[in-house]
Image: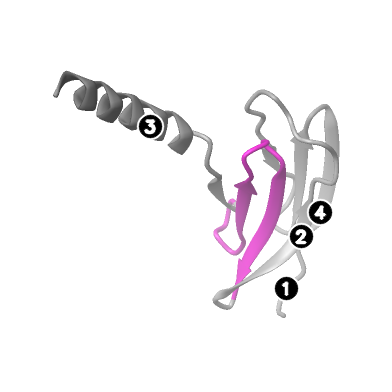
Amino acid sequence: MKKYTCICGFLFICTQLLTGCTDFSKTVVSPNGTHTLRIDYDFASCPTVYEEKNGSDVLLWSYQGVGFAETTFVFVEWTGEDTVDLTFAGKTVSLYLAEGV
């Protein structure tokens, strides 16, 4: 019985450790609330930025490099209602968000 308890405990700990390696996302809203960005991170902290528009997601930008060993985030700075700067891994990407679509 002790053997099965140890095996079950070991499997439980392994399951808990592996569930920490999942994808996550962050939502950012523009200052006036007209644009909503969703930043998805995969298991290697590589971001993909979508704009939520008319009930669907429009791909704006995706990181094309290799993954990261540590957790890395995109810092968002709204430079205007329709323009945003994304700073990630020491680089800045400027995006223009068009109306409509």
Residue positioned 77% across, 69% down in the render: 98
Front residue of this view, candidates 54 and 72? 72
Disc 4, disc 2: CB below 8 Å?
Answer: yes
Residue 16 got which mark? 3
Q: Amino acid at mark 1?
A: Glu
* Disc 2/disc 1 C-alpha distance (Å): 13 Å
Quadrant where the image shows the N terminus = top left
Q: To which residue does mark 4 refer?
A: 95
Front residue of this view, candidates 29 and 2? 2
Q: Nearer the viewer, mark 4 or mark 3?
A: 3
Q: Amino acid at mark 4?
A: Leu
Front residue of this view, candidates 75 and 73? 73
Residue 45 position within the rendered picture, expressed as x and y whole percent measured from the top left? 67, 36
Q: Amino acid at mark 2?
A: Leu
Residue 99 got which mark? 1
Disc 3, disc 2: CB below 8 Å?
Answer: no
Disc 4, disc 3: CB below 8 Å?
Answer: no
Q: Nearer the viewer, mark 2 or mark 1?
A: 2
Quick one: label 3 or label 1, which is nearer the N terminus?
3
Residue 44 covered by magenta stretch:
yes
Front residue of this view, candidates 78 and 74? 74
